[in-house]
């Protein structure tokens, strides 16, 4: 049902280093606030019920599905979207560069989420094997590529960032 | 780039080129339909059928209309005088023309069919209000399988298709009866392929703006074929086509599904016009899985006449496609069954072929093109026949295929595919060798003796792509692509704007087209700005599907570039005070001219640019259109008249 006045809250979000204060309906998803209210349209909705991973952002450094996290749950927390991934000088982040070099994307719709999920994954496992990449990235669906080049990209990103091990394939 | 250009040299085509468009997507700057915002935009939400087959007794919108933020709520009766239903054309005389209303009238024919629409100030409010719409149904028996649909006394889904068949054909090639008389044995198979859903990562979406002052409609939508959608929307909404602009920005996948116009997305521009405010609708995943076109559900019953040595002499096949509730615009229900039927003889020399194909009406989501469009099922049937022959004769399955392959080219198949060249024997042999087929078969035989059963399968497909107009016509498809377009323009800075009729949604076409153009003009990939997906910016084209885009638009790009080079040579000749004919016609000659002209201008420029020294550019070239060239690349052979009796049904349908 339509929320009444009491169902609105004022929240503070730090998004890509900038603090935003907004009054939002308590039922409003974090993704909608990012896309609609803050114009950060690099976050995409693919299923809107937490299955496809296309809406992945980072909340306090952890990959989160912004379609099923309410904006009020993110109050006071630090959020990173794809718009905050590349350094300001126009260069790409090493993960983005790896996805470019290894053609880890096609239509690009799942790509921002893949990049953000990769960063979270590599933080937890800087030297993954191929199998570990497959498992670690299994929350993000891609319909175009067949995943081979995505796995290649994540492994290349791991090497570029510094972790390196004998890749088992 | 340094120095004079190498015109026409294949420098970039075939080279490993990093895709120029990728950084946009990697940084979240690729814009999809739902990313666009317009001031004052309203959001639509649909009320969808909860029944597969039911009569609509009443639709009560009153509660929804009173909800906060609601601007309008409509059911069929509110809109039917102001828009046409979707009508998919088909040239076959067996076709039962049915209509797909933008909002269901009287009856619903699938779960999820839109019955009403609510428009509100935001999407949350629109969905709240849609929940308040009360629909009263009289449920009817739903038709959920081909067998049920074809049975005597089956419930009729469309009055206009009383036998629950959208369209059918019966075709003979060769002498099938004789083939079966001469056969030593026959193999009979029945194959079923399940339904597929395309599940694009980006669900279908539409944003529309009506400019009432000039009667212009602008529609952003997730479409593989923006010009075709423009044609359809103009007809449905009664807006002159030149006043409709369809912009298909980046798509999160298409897979064929986004070549089909669905009622919900067609209703969005209608709402924008009716309300005088922009309206947006983006499908959620539930809607997508319910009503976006699905694919591939077919039953094949095939019989093959086989000689004792393994040669297949003829095939009879009954092809049933569960086409769901509607025949989709533009390709119609004839496409899927026809594609399957035409591919049942595969790469094999089987001149005697009889097929009966039926597109069956059921109460499911309509079926449409999806990744291969009927060809995978045709291939499956062909290959299963080969395997059955091998099993019956205890022959090696590879051997059966080698025995039946088409060996002499050119070859016209029973389904009229003109195969110009090929070496299927060598191709299969290469595959077998690389796979280690012989060793694997040996290993599997040894394992079988120990009770371990493993196998190896073979399938061989001749891929059909970039269909010409005659091929579409043969399939009964009347809105057919027989060409595509490239418009090339040299901008004042010497760089190139290339507008093409294709769409790029994961294929990397921005890079591919730039590679082709840059090779022709002696430029770099970055020097070519590829424009597509906007009917306001590119000449009429047919978009991307059926592996057609590179062949058609790439070809058109080459023709346009050659035209540009010719014009440049004329101007270069003028600058050099030479006769253009003296400059020759080959790329090498152009390069000489370019080099000389470059020396004249004292700078190094790309060849066609050097002909005009910067100082005199304004006087020499009144406008960049002087350098523009539009080419259509036609495809296919001259059209086969689809009225030919070969393509007409020749006997009554057997049930």
Image (spheres, coloured by chain):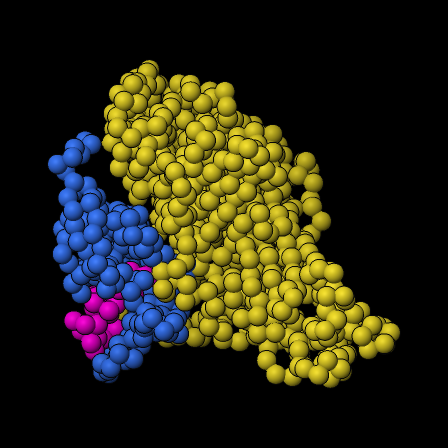
Q: Residue at x 80, y 69 (%)?
A: B570
**Magenta-highlighted residues:** A111-137
Question: Camera-side residue: B430 or B528?
Answer: B528
Quarter of the image that includes the N terminus of chain B: bottom right
Chain A colour as displayed: blue
Q: Is B18 left or right of B42, judged from the image as shown?
A: right
Q: Is B259 left or right of B566, judged from the image as shown?
A: left
Quadrant for residue B521, please give it: bottom right
Determine the main secondary structure of the stretch shown in magenta: helix
| Chain letter for the yellow colouring in the rendering | B
Residue A121 is situated, as x and y percent measured from the top left of the image, at 20, 68
Question: Camera-side residue: B488 or A135?
Answer: B488
Q: Residue furthest top?
A: B57
Labels in figure, total = 0
Question: Camera-side residue: B653 or B404?
Answer: B653
Q: Give above or below for B644 relative to B381.
A: above
User: Is residue B409 shown to the viewer in this render?
Assistant: no
Q: Residue at x 26, y 37 (%)?
A: B124
Residue B268 is situated, as x and y percent measured from the top left of the image, at 43, 35
Q: Give above or below for A30 relative to B643.
A: below
Quadrant for residue B155, please give it: top left
Residue B484 is situated, as x and y percent measured from the top left of the image, at 63, 53
| In magenta segment, residue A7 | no
| In magenta segment, residue A118 | yes
User: Is residue A95 shown to the viewer in this render?
Assistant: yes
Residue B151 is situated, as x and y percent measured from the top left of the image, at 40, 26
């Amino acid at each position: 049902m339509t929320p009444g006045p009491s169902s609105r809250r004022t929240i503070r979000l730090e998004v890509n280093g900038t603090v935003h204060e907004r009054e939002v309906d308590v039922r409003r998803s974090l993704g909608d606030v990012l896309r609609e209210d803050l114009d950060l349209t690099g976050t995409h909705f693919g299923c809107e019920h937490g299955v496809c991973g296309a809406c992945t952002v980072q909340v306090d450094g952890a990959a989160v599905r912004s379609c099923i996290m309410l904006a009020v749950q993110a109050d006071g927390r630090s959020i990173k979207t794809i718009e905050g991934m590349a350094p300001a000088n126009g260069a790409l982040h090493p993960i983005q560069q790896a996805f470019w070099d290894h053609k880890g994307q096609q239509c690009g719709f799942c790509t921002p989420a893949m990049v953000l999920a990769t960063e979270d994954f590599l933080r937890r496992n800087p030297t993954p094997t191929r199998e570990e990449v497959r498992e670690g990235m299994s929350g993000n669906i891609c319909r175009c590529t067949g995943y081979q080049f995505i796995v290649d990209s994540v492994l290349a990103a791991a090497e570029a960032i510094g972790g390196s091990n004998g890749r088992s394939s | 780039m340094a120095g004079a250009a190498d015109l026409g040299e294949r420098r970039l085509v075939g080279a490993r080129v990093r895709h120029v468009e990728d950084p946009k997507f990697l940084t979240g700057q690729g814009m999809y339909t739902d990313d666009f915002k317009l001031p004052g935009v309203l959001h639509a939400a649909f009320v969808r059928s909860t029944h597969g087959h039911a009569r609509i007794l009443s639709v009560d919108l009153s509660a929804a209309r009173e909800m906060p933020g609601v601007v309008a709520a409509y059911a069929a009766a509110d809109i039917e005088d102001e828009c046409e239903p979707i009508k998919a054309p088909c040239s076959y005389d067996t076709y039962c023309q049915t209509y797909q209303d933008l909002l269901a009238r009287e009856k619903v024919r699938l779960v999820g069919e839109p019955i009403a629409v609510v428009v509100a100030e935001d999407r949350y409010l629109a969905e709240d209000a849609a929940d308040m719409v009360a629909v009263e149904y009289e449920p009817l028996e739903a038709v959920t399988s081909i067998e049920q649909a074809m049975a005597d006394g089956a419930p009729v889904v469309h009055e206009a298709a009383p036998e629950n068949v959208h369209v059918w054909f019966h075709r003979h090639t060769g002498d099938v009866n004789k083939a079966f008389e001469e056969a030593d044995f026959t193999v009979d198979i029945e194959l079923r392929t399940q339904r597929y859903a395309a599940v694009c990562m980006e669900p279908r979406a539409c944003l529309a703006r009506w400019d009432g002052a000039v009667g212009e409609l602008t529609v952003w939508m997730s479409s593989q074929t923006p010009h075709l959608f423009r044609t359809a929307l103009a007809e449905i909404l009664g807006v002159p086509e030149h006043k409709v602009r369809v912009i298909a920005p980046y798509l999160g996948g298409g897979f064929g599904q986004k070549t089909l116009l669905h009622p919900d997305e067609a209703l969005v521009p209608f709402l924008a016009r009716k309300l005088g405010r922009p309206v947006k609708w983006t499908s959620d995943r539930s809607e997508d899985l319910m009503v976006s076109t699905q694919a591939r559900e077919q039953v094949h019953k095939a019989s093959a006449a086989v000689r004792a040595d393994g040669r297949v002499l003829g095939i009879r096949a009954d092809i049933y496609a569960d086409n769901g509730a509607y025949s989709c615009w533009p390709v119609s229900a004839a496409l899927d069954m026809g594609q399957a039927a035409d591919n049942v003889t595969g790469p094999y020399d089987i001149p005697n072929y009889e097929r009966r194909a039926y597109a069956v009406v059921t109460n499911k989501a309509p079926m449409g093109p999806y990744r291969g469009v009927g060809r995978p099922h045709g291939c499956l049937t062909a290959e299963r026949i080969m395997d059955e022959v091998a099993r019956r004769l205890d022959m090696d399955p590879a051997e059966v295929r080698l025995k039946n392959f088409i060996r002499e080219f050119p070859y016209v198949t029973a389904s009229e595919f003109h195969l110009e060249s090929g070496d299927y024997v060598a191709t299969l042999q290469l595959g077998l060798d690389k796979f280690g087929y012989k060793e694997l078969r040996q290993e599997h035989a040894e394992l079988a003796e120990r009770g371990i059963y493993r196998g190896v399968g073979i399938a061989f497909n001749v891929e059909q792509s970039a269909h010409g107009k005659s091929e579409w016509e043969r399939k009964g498809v009347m809105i057919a692509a027989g060409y595509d377009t490239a418009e090339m323009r040299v901008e004042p800075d010497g760089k190139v704007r290339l507008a093409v009729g294709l769409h790029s949604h994961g294929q990397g076409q921005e890079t591919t087209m730039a590679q082709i153009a840059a090779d022709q003009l002696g430029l770099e990939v970055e020097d070519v700005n590829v424009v597509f997906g906007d009917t306001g910016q590119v000449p009429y084209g047919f978009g991307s599907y059926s592996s057609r885009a590179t062949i058609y638009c790439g070809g058109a790009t080459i023709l346009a570039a050659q035209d540009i080079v010719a014009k440049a040579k004329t101007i270069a000749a003028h600058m050099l005070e030479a006769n253009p004919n003296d400059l020759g016609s080959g790329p090498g000659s152009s390069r000489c001219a370019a080099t000389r002209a470059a020396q004249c201008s004292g700078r190094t420029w790309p060849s066609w640019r050097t002909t005009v020294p910067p100082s005199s550019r304004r006087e020499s070239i009144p406008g960049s259109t002087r350098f523009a060239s539009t080419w259509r690349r036609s495809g296919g052979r001259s059209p086969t008249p689809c009225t030919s009796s070969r393509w007409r049904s020749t006997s009554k349908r057997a049930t």
